[in-house]
Amino acid sequence: MTKIKHIISLTLLLVTMVAHATTFRVQAPTKVEVGGKFRVEYVLEGAEGTNPSLPQLNGAKLLYGPSVSTSMSMTSINGKTSTNYSQVFTMLYEAETPGKHTLPPATITADGKRLTTRATAIEIVPSSGNHNASPQYPSQPFQPSPQPSNDPDFTNPMNQTAGNNVDANDFFVKVSMSKEVVYEQEAVVCLIKLFTRYNVSRFHCTQQPTFNGFLIEELPVNNNSPQLETVNGKQYYTAVLKKCILYPQQSGKLTITSGNYDVQLVQYDVYSTPMGQISQPSPIDIQVKSNSASVNIKPLPEPKPANFSGAVGEFTAKSMVDQHSFKTYAPATYSITVSGTGNLKYIQNPVVVMPREFDVYDPQSKVNLSPDGNNMSGDVTFEYPFIPQHVGDFEIPDTYFVFFNTSTQQYDSIKVNGCKLKVEKGEGKPSEHYKLRDMDIRPITTDEITLSKSQNFFITKWWYWLIFATTMLLTFTILTVYRKIEKTHADTTLMRTRRASKVAQRRLKKAQECLNHHDTNGFYTETLTALWGYLSDKLSIPVSELSKDNIAAEMEQFGFQQQHIDDTLNMLETCEFAQYAPSLDDGDMPAVYDKCAQLIDQLEKTKRSKTSTK
């Protein structure tokens, strides 16, 4: 009996080891007819892979792919739970050239290793007239589950019949938060993702979600290739619309409001002909509203330390001076560098007490950050410039950097070492704005003093009254001009309109940089931001109320020509389409940039109509 138990335990151990092994293999048919469609699947099990290299098959036409689907399973053996990841890269081909062809090995990086599949032989035989025959696949332990025939198939237009009802299970936008409960200033990731079972020909956000109570750090998203995900047993193609790190600024329950979207999906009318079935695109317009997402914000524990910097996360701190020898009237810098993960961008300057004999300038900060999972990591350096004014030995005392540690959920204090300085005599003279402190006697003046015995009353001179009148007139003129400028600055609508073109040109420079670096997603994002911002300022429309309908109405009331209105709406639609579906965009980025710049220039030349009510 004991021997049987040992055998069972050994078997379970071997099964567990196999389950945790990382494998990469290819699934392809051994034989297929000319004109037949078949799939080649690369299956990675046991880890998530990066940098896949998937070769194409000679003798066949690639119809679609590669598409990626990811799944995760959990196994519990003898109380121990293990997680297994799997990825499937699918490519759809149509056989063309008869003969024996070899599919070269594919490679992928997983668990720090470069994995390779075997080379696979595929024979393409002459057509027997039955292209619906299934290709012959070798026996493999993994077989992907087929999609139900009554559900739309992204790769097969024949199964996306026009007239089918599109419900919330076929297309939706989901807002999700990485955590449900956080502290003030603790990072939480918000992800807005699109899920669809149909092709998307147009996507437009009519109302953006709001992030009241948060500071936002946008993260780059990559939608160059579609991703396949399974939700409730159904497969969806997904695209990340927005990903950002949020830092809550107040306690309580904060909610990310839902967004509204106008979407055009593509269904197909299928016709039977003597040559087979053909499909004709049939667009369908729908309106989608995303969910809202909430997160509970806990206040930081009280009482807060007196020298609390506002930093929340996990940090280290160190200090340094930029030189080893010091001389009077020569500038130097004492700096404190805070490194770690958290709200580095928003922490306050540590308090540093400098010797009174130093001419001290306002501290400056340099921030170096990059995304790290669900937070921002990097460092921020606080520089304290100073100029010694006296010879002698001085000391910058130690200070403390206090932050709230999210791991221990308590305040931590890091000692930041000061430094001792020996200042020698240098060349130069005291700083002009340096003031002597704690001294009762001013330096003795050694310059010659000219004394006068007679007194002249210049008030009786003519030039005195001329200077007086000129001064009064100049003062009155300055006050009048100042009041006019102050009144103009108080008119926020007028100021926004005047600054609209300058702000738009600065934003277009960022689009130009993305264009030079061939960053398609960044280019259309910056171009769209410049155009939306310009229209908001030019037409005095709050950002929260921006929409195509509002813009068209306000432009007409402003006095723009109908051609300008149509060009503006077309440019917004072009940029939005390219931003949310770059894989469907055939536009020319230089042409879009030039057209957007010309459009803003034309709009800037138009003055507000006198009949406008604003």
Image (cartoon, helix red, strand yellow):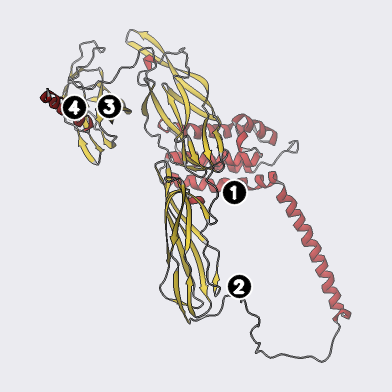
Q: Which residue is mark 2?
A: 433
Q: Which residue is mark 3?
A: 75
Q: Pinpoint residue 11: horizontal percent, then vertical percent.
A: 15, 26
The quarter in which the C terminus is drawn is: top right
Name the residue at 75% across, 58% down. Answer: 482
**Label 3 crowd (10 A; few <14 / some 14-19 / many >=20):** few
Left or right relative to 35: residue 535 = right
Q: What's the distance in space between the residues labelled 4 and 3, CA to CA?
A: 12 Å
Q: Nearer the viewer, residue 131 or 435?
A: 435
Residue type pointed to by label 1: Lys
**Label 1 crowd (10 A; few <14 / some 14-19 / many >=20):** few
Q: Is residue 365 above or below residue 149?
A: below
**Label 2 crowd (10 A; few <14 / some 14-19 / many >=20):** few
Q: Pinpoint residue 272: horizontal percent, then vertical percent.
A: 36, 8
Q: Nearer the viewer, mark 4 or mark 2?
A: 4
Q: Nearer the viewer, residue 488 or 47?
A: 47
Q: What's the distance in space between the residues labelled 3 and 2, CA to CA?
A: 72 Å
Which circle's residue, 1 or 4, is located before the other in the chain?
4
Q: Nearer the viewer, mark 1 or mark 4?
A: 4
Q: Which residue is mark 4?
A: 12
Left or right relative to 150: residue 509 = right
Label 1 sits on a secondary structure element that is helix
